[in-house]
Each structure stands twice: as structure tokens, then as C-alpha cells.
Image (cartoon, grey):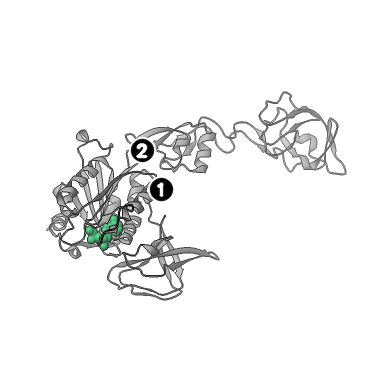
Amino acid sequence: MCYFAKINQCYRNKDTVMLSAQEAEAIVLNLAQPLDSQRDVETVDLLAASGRILATPVTSSLDFPYWDNSAMDGYAVRFADVENCNSEKPIALDVVEEIPAGYQPQHTVQPGQAARIFTGAVMPAGADTVVMQEETRREGDRIFILVSPEKPQAFVRHKGAFYQAGMPLLNSGTVINASEMAVLATAQCIQVPVYRRLRVAIFSTGDELVSPDQPLSPGKLVDSNQYALTVLLAQMGFEVIRLGIIPDNQQELTKAITQAVSTADVVLSTGGVSVGEYDYVEKILADLGGKIHIRAVAIKPGKPLTVAAFKRDLKNSDAPAISDCLYFGLPGNPVSALVCCWRFVVPALRKISGLGPDAWGPEFIRARCNVELRSPGKRETYVWGKLYLVAGVWEFEPASGSQNSANLINLANTTGLAVLPAAETWIWPGEFVDVLKVSQ
Ligand code: AMP
Ligand code: MG
């Protein structure tokens, strides 16, 4: 039986199609296709490009520095005039002009002359070297050079020394943070081509769920997943479409899933993907034409992760111009949902959003753990806690309290998930482990 036939057949026994974390990661990254560098691009004003991803490489028609200029407050001189002087035998030059930053020099410096110059000011014609102010003595219109410069061109920043017009400036896939913003501003790139924001729809499923402002009648539970996921996605710069809480009702779920896959690039739902009587999500995904690629992953927490892909008819869709919609049916338990997100969803979203392969992750750090870690040993186990850098060595400290997938309380301040491979039941104090770095 082919893989997909098998995967679509067994709704009630996920163990039969449980993938390793590595297999699941490969499938997810393969399904995650980057936005189109022509179709999925918008041009935004410089400051609006903050945090966005460049969709095309940027070059500039300007050299940088724009002009030959001084790197010091001092005097622009001719090297030949001052190459043999010292404090006992200073050379005196006539100061013919003062050039503040931002002004054009008016004179050509002739032999025996100098120009007072300030940091960033344009070098005058005739001068080839700057002597710093601290190595001179001024008397009226004369300047005494007390130390000969090391070499011609000292303290001159030459036009084009850092960047020449036409060379690559920033690659596509670059995130525009403070330093990239400075580069774009310098290049006078005031209209920036960036990938459009990914649209990610999220909703929670479960008859027991209420929102944080609703009264808690017996048996109810606050929907924390929607809040956690909203923050995670918003901080990654995505457009989040919140579809609320959907009850465990096939009709309502069908409506919500249909709406989500027709309007978003990626859909995240939580709950309803396990093997219980009210876990309808997988069946509905298949009924709606979704191709189920993952039904369960051998990780703890997070086993019942469901991943499906939808092909869309672009002509009949309000959805943004992307041909596929990727659906992640995350487990309902709050820790499981976040672990699956950090491990599989975040790398996929990074890839789809246009980032280069270096930035997809997941990022693992080898860290020492000073306490023992235990795992039942059947599935790859993730222990949540904090990463510290201690005297140049990464250390991992597990969160104290219960490492139970329903315990979201001690998940606060998590910066890493220590990975215990499937066969590993015990990590001794002082041993090194791989830790998945997570963003909060
Ligand atoms: P499920 O995957 O639907 O079987 O849910 C597993 C567990 O996670 C149950 O105890 C649910 O009550 C809980 N749960 C499901 N969805 C949420 C949510 N959105 N926020 C917090 N807990 C949830
Ligand atoms: Mg449920």
C-alpha cells in the first residue's frame, strides 16, 4: 500500500505512521515553498521595511564614501611637505582655509600650505594626507606639524573605499534590521522591495475552551494556545488571522477549516488531532481534499502532529497569490503545541516567508546539563528550560516542576528544549546535550 493511502486510512492508530522528528522535518521543509520573488512582492517606504525580508538584491549607483574625506579633526596637508618632521624639527605650514563637514573646499592646497579640516569633511584638492590635531601646534594662521604621518593618504577615507557603485549591496532574503536599514538609507534606497507578509490563520478547537475574559463554568479551560501562537507569529512579522475557538463539531470545524485554507498561506489549529472520539480535524482535512503528509511524530511532547497540504485554485480564491496552503494540526496540550511550533512550524514559516536557508533553523546548541535528565526512551523527548552562557560554555537548566505537556506554567521563560534521542533514557549530570534554541 502506498504511503498516502496508508496515512489516509488509519485515523485511529497513529502509532502505525509515526515518523521520526528528522523525517517530519524533511517533509515539512519540502512542503514549505518560498513566496514568489516576482508575484509575492510589495514596495514599501524605507522605514516601513523594518523587520521585512528583501525580495530582490539591492545595489546602489552611489560609491561609499561618496567623496574623499577626512577621518580625523586635523589638517589636510601634502605628504611631501611633512614626511620628515618631528617635535624638535616641526614643519610650519600656512592655513589657507577651514573646511567643516558638509562644505565644499574652496582652495587647492599648494606646497607649504594646509587646510583646517574636520571629521567627515571633503578633502581639498592638492592635499593627500591628514595630520591629526593632537600632533600639531597652531599659532595664528600657521600650523606646526609635530609628527610626520606614517604614510601618504593617512586618515583619508577614499571615495568608494567601502563600496563601489553597482556592486551587490544586500542579498534577497536579508531581514532588514538596524544595520541593514543604515545601509539602505546610505544608498538612498527609499523604496524597498520586500516579500509580502505571510498570512497565517489560527484557531483553537475544543468544547471545553473559553477565552480568558469568559467565566469558567465547571469543566472549562482557558484557550491559552491561541494567545501563545498569536504572539509567536506576530513577533515573527506575520499577518495573523484569528478565527477564535471552534467547538468539537464536524460542521463548524469544516466551516472554519474551509475558511482558513481559502484565505491564509498557512493554517495552525490546535486540538482535535489525537485519537479520541471528538478528534475530527484529520478526517475533515482529508474530506476537504487536503493531502495528509504527517499524522504523528515520535516526539514527546507533541506526538499527534498532523500536517496537510492543500492545492488551491487561484482564479477562484480570495487568497494571496500562493498556490498551496500548508495546514498544521497541532496537539491541544499547550506545551505540545508550542514544541511542535518551535520544532517544525517556525522553520517552515521562515522558509515560506523568503528567508535564505541559513535562517530557517532549527538551531541546535551543544550545552552542558548539570542535573540528570530522564526520558521514557520510546520517543525523542524535549525537556524545556533555559540556556545560559557560562565562561564561554553553553549550559542548560531544565525548568523546575512538572515536565508535563499540560503544564504551561513552568514553560514561561523557556529559551531552549534539550533533546533526548529516542533510545536515550538518562543523561548524567555534566553531560552535553543538543538544545533547540527557541524564540519567545
Ligand atoms: P486535544 O488535543 O484536543 O485532545 O487536547 C489535549 C489537551 O489540551 C486537553 O486537555 C485540552 O483541554 C487541552 N487543550 C486543547 N486546546 C487547548 C487550548 N487552546 N488551550 C489550552 N489547552 C488546550
Ligand atoms: Mg480537544
Q: Position of residue 252 (x, y in %)?
A: 18, 48
Q: Quadrant of the N terminus?
A: bottom left
Secondary structure at badge 2 equals loop
Q: Quadrant of residue 39?
A: top left
Compared with 383, 39 (above or below) is above
Q: Quadrant of the C terminus?
A: bottom left
Compared with 132, 380 (above or below) is below
Structural distance between the alpha carbons of marks 2 and 1: 16 Å
Q: In the rendered view, does 282 fall on the left or right side of 115?
A: left
Residue bearing the label numbered 1 = 235
Residue 115 visible somewhere in the drawing: yes
* Image mark for residue 11: none
- Whether the residue carrying mark 2 lies under 8 Å from ligand 1 is answered with no
Q: In the rendered view, does 394 fall on the left or right side of 259?
A: right
Q: Residue at x 83, y 43 (%)?
A: 86
Residue bearing the label numbered 2 = 196
Three-letter amino acid code of the residue under disc 2: Arg
Q: How many marks?
A: 2
Between residue 106 and residue 412, name the one nearer to us.
412
- Whether the residue carrying mark 1 lies under 8 Å from ligand 1 is answered with no
Three-letter amino acid code of the residue under disc 1: Gln
Work out whether mark 2 precedes mark 1 in sequence or the reverse, and give the earlier one: 2
Q: In the rendered view, does 258 fall on the left or right side of 367?
A: left
